[in-house]
Image (cartoon, coloured by chain):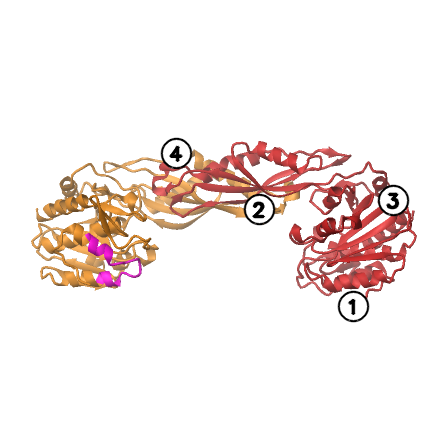
Chain colours: A red, B orange
């Protein structure tokens, strides 16, 4: 399979969509991306599993990292790609092969950038974190991800979304004492006790802090509840799994301390956590990027891989073509005009 | 396998325990019971599946039904039977082969009872209601269960337990609206909504009504709770399964109406119900039985097969040797003295 990087970005997007690359099966697409990039003499290309990294070496004072994942969620009868009324449909069109097409176009066209550029194409973003290609690179080849600033080209509707909120899951456990339900007063019903946990959740006032000029919006929600032994038994345990989404002015450790304070008196077991990322808008490189892309930047509320750059000390924002609400849907699609606009703005900024 | 009904009741209990009869595998024990009863010329014996019914026909004005199940819960390393310090150990010793041994002894010894007697030995009491042998008999051969009064010889600690409470299970459903947990304010969390269901349960005041001189004690408990879609989704459904144990002054229909009133505003789906049984202590036959057995009768709080007799229009009580708390345990056992006392009291009452 061959990728012609002289194709217009929407045509290149269609080509990328038609090379199926569900998480774990990115090999053919990674091969095509690698081959196309190796034909470009101004780039140094590295391969790591199904990830490809290409770098300019113009000797500029600054380096920007443009990153995108090449995998998709499972195909849902939405391949091959098709065009209709200015929209390009297909699995991965919006999330995020349009962004990847822009990366590839920039890699091919901007041979003398005003900042050095590292293009990262990685695998397994749509599955569990331990398989994530960017995580793997950050452990095995962190030098490949070095830079002054990073842009994750996920769909953001063409507006810069700064940083991201962190996420933490914890199990809050209510306990009781078993008894036969015909003599329930001999026991203590743990499900009834869990009502007090739900009271806390219902009364919780979520913060909406301003962080570097962006307004984040936290949330604390039960995402699972489970309790019960048998139809005739007063249960002795009920577990509420909560998901705390926290703004990037709190570290994961601070978020955990907050959760333990909110649920003081209960057993709290954190099962999963990922810190957020500050937007870094005070950084001159970030500020110039925001200005160049236009529009008013907003806070990223969901967790994204910008947090991995943050952990590496690289300020990062999210910016790319496509409406994020359309990701993972059967009718996933992207506006052709949005791909072209993103390419034009990025190209102008990189050249500057 | 041969059953010698001239054995003392504790020895006969041990013999019964040693003939394994887990629910569904009662054949050998039913055969032994049938063969032993058929040797007694004063009894007319019927067989239905693994159930055996034997009846005297002395022509008395009244007929009493003595019923017991011959199946047990699964063996738990507690066979064969063994004796230690006045106790007989083994699977089914307490629940309820001691009671069955008393039935068999009475069947053999009381050839000229003061009331005609029907002895019912039935299968599959320890499993789902639809397999219950007494239910099967009540549908296929109801004439075999006819009588003025019935005693279910389940373990009651040697005290008459009158009637039984009914039981009803229902699913109470809280609904909401799905959303990504990073933007939880766009959804309505059904688990949080279920907190109001748990509030109702916590605030519920259970009745303790007097029914024919016995004090029952109701209960309304969550026995299961379940909700959640994924770790990053505000869930749109949460189901609380409640078990309502209701006194026999309420019919199942009245109990259901009560539940629907308590949970007005929610979707309520009754999944399982069984009406209770009034104690019938005003009935002269029941009253004479209570006097003969001694002690102060108390209300049966758990549901038992007396409800099936109640449904057939036959007043019924529970009375038998053994502590019901010991049923279904690995260390299940029965006091040997309790078996002998039960036999003696029943024999005296039947002869009178």
Image disc number at residue A1: 1
Chain letter of the residue carrying label 3: A
Magenta run includes residue B27: yes
Count of numbered labels shown in the rendering? 4
In this view of the protein, which residue sits in the foreground, B112 or B163? B112
* Residue ID for mark 2: B235
Image disc number at residue A62: 3
In this view of the protein, which residue sits in the foreground, B262 or A339? A339
Image disc number at residue B205: 4
Badge 2 local density, few (<14 within 10 Å), some, or many (20+)? many
Label 1: element kind: loop
Question: Which of the 4 image quarters holds residue A51?
Answer: bottom right
Q: Where does the image place residue A10, in percent across and percent down from the top left? A: 82, 59
- Which residues, given as a range, are shown in magenta? B13-30
Does residue B266 appear in the picture of this structure?
yes
Q: Nearer the viewer, mark 1 or mark 2?
A: 1
* Contact flag, marks 4 and 3 (Cβ < 8 Å): no
Q: Residue at x 58, y 31 (%)?
A: A261
Q: Nearer the viewer, mark 1 or mark 4?
A: 1
The answer to whether tags 1 and 2 share a subunit is: no
Chain letter of the residue carrying label 1: A
* Contact flag, marks 2 and 3 (Cβ < 8 Å): no
Image disc number at residue B310: none
Rendered-image quadrant of the N terminus of chain B: bottom left
Does residue A321 appear in the picture of this structure?
no
């Amino acid at each position: 399979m061959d990728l012609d990087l002289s194709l217009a970005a929407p045509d290149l997007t269609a080509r990328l969509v038609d090379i199926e690359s569900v998480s774990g099966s990115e090999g053919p697409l990674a091969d095509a991306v690698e081959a196309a990039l190796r034909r470009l003499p101004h780039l140094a290309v590295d391969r790591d599993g199904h990830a490809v990294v290409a770098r300019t070496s113009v000797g500029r004072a600054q380096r920007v990292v443009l990153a995108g994942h090449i995998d998709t969620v499972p195909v849902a009868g939405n391949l091959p790609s098709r065009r209709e009324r200015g929209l390009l449909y297909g699995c991965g069109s919006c999330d995020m092969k349009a962004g990847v097409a822009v990366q590839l176009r920039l890699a091919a066209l901007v041979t003398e950038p005003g900042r050095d550029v590292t293009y990262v194409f990685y695998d397994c973003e749509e599955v569990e974190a331990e398989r994530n290609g960017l995580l793997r690179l950050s452990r095995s080849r962190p030098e490949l991800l070095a830079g002054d600033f990073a842009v994750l080209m996920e769909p953001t509707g063409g507006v810069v979304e700064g940083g991201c909120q962190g996420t933490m899951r914890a199990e809050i456990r209510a306990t009781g004492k078993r008894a036969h339900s015909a003599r329930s007063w001999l026991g203590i019903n743990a499900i009834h006790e869990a009502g007090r946990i739900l009271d806390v959740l219902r009364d919780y006032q979520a913060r909406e802090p301003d962080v570097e000029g962006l307004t984040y919006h936290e949330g604390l929600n039960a995402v699972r509840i489970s309790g019960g032994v048998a139809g005739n038994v007063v249960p002795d345990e009920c577990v509420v799994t909560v998901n705390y989404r926290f703004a990037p002015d709190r570290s994961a450790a601070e978020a955990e301390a907050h959760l333990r304070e909110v649920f003081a008196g209960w057993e709290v077991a954190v099962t999963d956590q990922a810190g957020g990322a500050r937007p870094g808008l005070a950084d001159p490189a970030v500020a110039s990027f925001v200005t160049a892309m236009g529009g008013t930047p907003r806070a990223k509320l969901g967790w994204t891989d910008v947090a991995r750059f943050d952990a590496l000390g690289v300020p990062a924002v999210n910016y790319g073509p496509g409406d994020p609400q359309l990701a993972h849907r059967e009718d996933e699609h992207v506006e052709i005009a949005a791909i072209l606009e993103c390419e034009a703005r990025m190209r102008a900024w990189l050249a500057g």
